[in-house]
Amino acid sequence: MAIKVAAWLCLLSLPAWLVTAQSVASKAYTPMAGTCPEGFTLVRMAGSPGHQSLSSSEAAYVQARRSQVIPPAWKTYLANVEAANVTLPSYVSTILSGSSLETPNFGIATSGGGYRAAIFGAGVLNALDGRNASSNSAGLGGLLQAATYLVGLSGGSWLLTSLVHANLPTMRELIFGYPNPIIADNSWGGWNANYSVVAPSSDPITDTEYVTDLVEELEGKYDDGYVVTFVDLWARMLARHFVNGTFPSNFYNESYAHGAGILWSSVAETESFTSYAIPFPIIVSEVSAPGQNMSEVIPGKYIPISNPIFEFNSRWVPLTPCCPRLRQQSTLARRITASVSRTMTSHR
């Protein structure tokens, strides 16, 4: 498969007259130039070692959620626990009931492992969701609503990406989609788990046409001089499963954008985010650059890059206390190394 993909990527180097008309997805996926806002800085300096800080946007979101949403969420969770005849230590009940000045800072992490991890993570979140009556009866429901942070890695990030872009539906709606949905680029269609990510059809001709279409979706970005790699192709494959705009009825239809043009930073514009209804989402990623200095890296470990709604950051690493701002992603792609650019564009 890797050899076939490499061959398909070579299609991008063909003369323009040999390439078909640019698709809707290709136009949407191509980075757009624009004027940087007044006072723009390419990166935010997180501070000196031992004194590094959150971005002001993340800090403001967390503070608003902790003051407006989390206290009543903990009270609801406590009521569910007590209704299940579970006895908690008195100090825990005092804290969760709001009788104490302390409020737990609670985060949920979903691990990696491809589709299997995404499905398992969705099952766990379903068990912690206060909208699930059976979870409430078991004394688990409400923990999701009480969390401050929600983190995803690899397959777990597929789950988290779809959850936040789909505006925090229930886990059943997330995986299977809504009944009688409107087929549109900004509508949620479910995970499309009946289709393989790489080879969605049992027909090799259909699969070849499918991957060829994916490669053509990268044409605009390539023609504009941006680096295009397998990461872009992989992102376009995953978008048909975990980003708005793809349904079983339009899976192969190139008249739809299939998530192209939907940015991670646009999560901040969803209703669930503006109302502070969702735990602050974080995606964990990594960078591996050719020729990079590995002398300070523990073998088998990588510096994580996270919080892609507002910025990519690794603020807890003393040697890299700078955080590129995500909305100016194209500016970053032009100015920093191609290897970092490739990682960033994978999170469009």
Image (cartoon, rainbow, N blue to C red):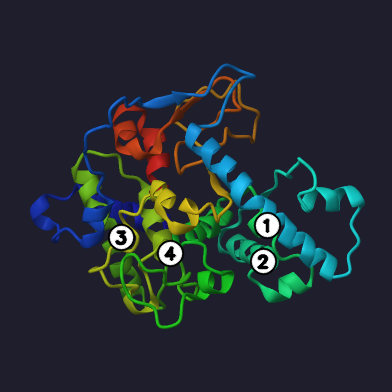
Q: Tell me the residue at 49%/57% (across/down).
A: 272
Amino acid identity at mark 4: Val
Crowding near the residue tagged with mark 2, few <14, some 14–19, many ≥20 C-alpha atoms within 10 Å: many
Amino acid identity at mark 2: Gly
Return the residue found at the far top: 48
Where does the image place residue 126, in percent across and percent down from the top left?
A: 65, 67
Amino acid identity at mark 3: Leu
Among numbered discs 2 and 4, the one appearing first in the sequence: 2
Q: Distance between the residues labelled 3 and 2?
A: 39 Å
Crowding near the residue tagged with mark 4, few <14, some 14–19, many ≥20 C-alpha atoms within 10 Å: few
Quadrant in the picture for residue 212: bottom left
Q: Tell me the residue at 89%/69% (across/down).
A: 85
Where does the image place residue 54, in percent across and percent down from the top left?
A: 55, 31
Q: Between tags 1 and 3, which lies in front? A: 1
The quarter of the rendered structure image containing the N terminus is: bottom left
Residue highlighted by disc 4? 198
Q: Which of 337 and 146 is in front in this view?
A: 146
The secondary structure type at the circle numbered 2 is loop
Residue highlighted by disc 1? 73
Residue highlighted by disc 2? 130
Quadrant in the picture for residue 333: top left
Residue highlighted by disc 3? 214
The secondary structure type at the circle numbered 1 is helix
Q: Answer whether residue 331 is visible to the viewer in this image.
A: yes
Q: Is residue 207 above or below residue 76?
A: below
Q: Which of 10 and 85 is in front in this view?
A: 85
